[in-house]
Image: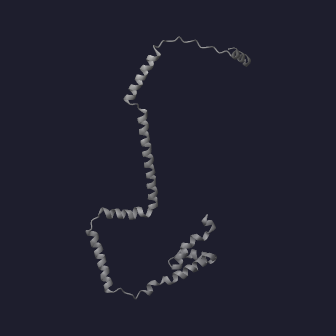
């Protein structure tokens, strides 16, 4: 959608390279032909050119400046001490952790924080369901004392009811459909 509303946005980087004098070949010809027909890009190019023109020849302004011997010696010492300290110093766990923190976690700290929040949430859900399942398991399995009490209650109930006598089963009633008025009459007479 952005490309349809601003079709010249794709030329911005090439315009910057052209203004700094780093664009060559077919790209340079293509951008120059686009500049001939587009007023917006031409004004953008002029703005970039005013910024980059003073910076284009920076090395000419500093060509006559030479560092002194003190600077050379200090730089040589710093390089030598850096090489020597790296070769002598063993990798301590603290340094390794610091480097890992700086290179792995710090650039993506929001992602790591989100992942840590998800893991804490999953751990909390897991612990809550785990303790809940232990409680239901404890409630569902009867203890030996409960089984003994249940058997005593069963014996007491059997003594109170008396001996069990088999009853003769009554034959099932046959159902004969009747009109609604006759059913009402039978209900009233009963």
Q: Report whether 87 appears left or right of 3.
A: left
Q: Quadrant of the N terminus?
A: bottom right
Can residue 135 be seen at all in this image of the molecule? Answer: yes
Place of residue 12 in the rendered image (x, y in percent of width and height, measured from the top left) = 56, 73
Q: Report whether 171 appears left or right of 66.
A: right
- Identified at 30% across, 79% down, the residue is 76
Place of residue 22 in the rendered image (x, y in percent of width and height, measured from the top left) = 50, 77
Q: Nearer the viewer, residue 78 or 185?
A: 185
Query: Relative to 139, is 53 above or below?
Result: below
Can residue 178 be seen at all in this image of the molecule? Answer: no
Q: Report whether 105 appears left or right of 33.
A: left
- Identified at 38% across, 31% down, the residue is 143
Q: Nearer the viewer, residue 43 or 135?
A: 135
Quarter of the image where one finds residue 5:
bottom right
Query: Relative to 153, is 101 above or below?
Result: below
Quarter of the image where one finds residue 43:
bottom right
Residue lying farthest top?
168
Place of residue 53 in the rendered image (x, y in percent of width and height, measured from the top left) = 52, 83
Residue lying farthest left?
88
- Identified at 54% across, 73% down, the residue is 14
Residue lying farthest right?
181
């Amino acid at each position: 959608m952005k490309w349809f509303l601003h079709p010249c946005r794709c030329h911005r980087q090439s315009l910057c390279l052209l203004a700094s004098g780093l664009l060559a070949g077919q790209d340079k010809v293509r951008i120059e032909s686009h500049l001939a027909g587009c007023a917006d890009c031409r004004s953008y190019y002029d703005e970039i050119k005013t910024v980059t023109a003073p910076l284009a020849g920076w090395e000419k302004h500093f060509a006559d400046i030479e560092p002194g011997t003190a600077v050379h010696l200090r730089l040589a010492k710093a390089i030598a001490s850096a090489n020597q300290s790296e070769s002598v110093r063993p990798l301590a766990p603290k340094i390794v952790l610091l480097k890992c923190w700086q290179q792995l976690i710090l650039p993506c700290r929001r992602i790591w924080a989100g992942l840590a929040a998800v893991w804490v949430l999953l751990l909390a859900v897991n612990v809550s369901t785990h303790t809940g399942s232990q409680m239901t398991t404890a409630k569902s399995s009867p203890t030996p004392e409960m089984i003994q009490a249940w058997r005593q209650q069963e014996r007491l109930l059997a003594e109170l009811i008396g001996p069990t006598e088999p009853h003769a089963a009554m034959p099932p009633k046959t159902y004969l459909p009747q009109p609604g008025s006759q059913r009402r009459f039978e209900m009233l007479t009963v």
